[in-house]
Amino acid sequence: MQTRKYNRVLLKLSGEALMGKAAYGISPEVLTYVAEEVRGLADLGVQLAIVIGAGNIFRGVAGASAGMDRASADNMGMLATVLNALAMQDTMERHGVPTRVLSAIPMPTVCESYARQRAIHHLKRGRAVIFAAGTGNPFFTTDTAATLRALEINADVICKATRVDGVYDKDPLKNTDAVKFDTLTYGEVLRRRLKVMDSAAISLALDNHKDIVVFDMNIPGNIKKAVAGERIGTLITGADDE
């Protein structure tokens, strides 16, 4: 049986990833694919937490750029992540993965409210945990929420699933001469302004020495490889060049 390098993992998924080939909303096919991929982690005994964005439904930054009050727009975006989390939970449960949704914005008739010890309790009991509603505060992205939750539950690594096979110096979907990085330091990411996660998330990971693995979620088995410590995608780790 495949071994694991990490025991507790925070998986960051973008909301856009849930759209599949559609222009909006949630694709049942993508939900099924993700559920089947994470189910394989149970064979490794991995404790899994997930943070999902809301770009498939509503982005606070986009709303603000269209003239909305930024705090109101971000609140709408955080609520949209709850929709994604509930959809993901339902699919994972139907695929045999016990799952709990914990929301930073209390809504007890829909899901559990976030509490650090409650999240750790579920993880130790073998349940996947989906963190919804970001940090519960406007002006923070779900990337920052993912890093914050990873630190709070003492995750061994942050796995960021994307549409490409790692971090490049420019968008590889638009530039054929884009160069991929196998490893990066947090400082390099900030200095080069690489669009991996927002600067707050990267700075938080830097200050707390939390590794980030960026990989292509569309390749079956990649999440299992990342958790096993195989060299796929891009590893962001270590202090800046000194």
Image: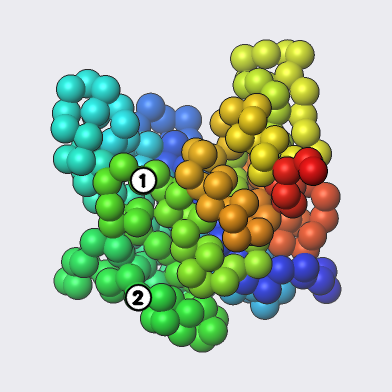
Judge whether 32 appears above or below 100 on screen: above
- Label 2: how many Cα within 10 Å (few below 14, some 14–19, many 20+): few
> Residue 188: image x %, image y %?
70, 35
Q: Residue at x 55, y 47 (%)?
A: 203
Q: Quadrant of the C terminus?
A: top right
In the displayed orientation, state which residue is furthest to the front.
Answer: 242
Examine the rendering and report whether any part of residue 1 can be seen: yes
Q: Are marks 1 and 2 in contact (CB under 8 Å)?
A: no
**What amino acid type should be assigned to the residue bearing mark 1?**
Phe
Q: Residue at x 76, y 14 (%)?
A: 177
Q: Quadrant of the N terminus?
A: bottom right
Judge whether 125 appears above or below 46 on screen: below
- Label 1: how many Cα within 10 Å (few below 14, some 14–19, many 20+): some
The disc at residue 140 is 1
Front residue (pair 1, 85): 85
Q: Residue at x 60, y 60 (%)?
A: 208
> Residue 47: image x %, image y %?
59, 74
**What amino acid type should be assigned to the residue bearing mark 2?**
Ala
Horizontally, residue 162 falls left or right of residue 242, namely left
Judge whether 170 appears above or below 27 on screen: above
Mark 1 and mark 2 lie on one chain; the one further toward the N terminus is: 2
Q: Quadrant of residue 233?
A: top right
Judge whether 134 appears above or below 119 on screen: above
In this figure, which residue is indicated by the disc labeled 2?
115
Q: Quadrant of residue 118?
A: bottom left
Q: Residue at x 51, y 72 (%)?
A: 153
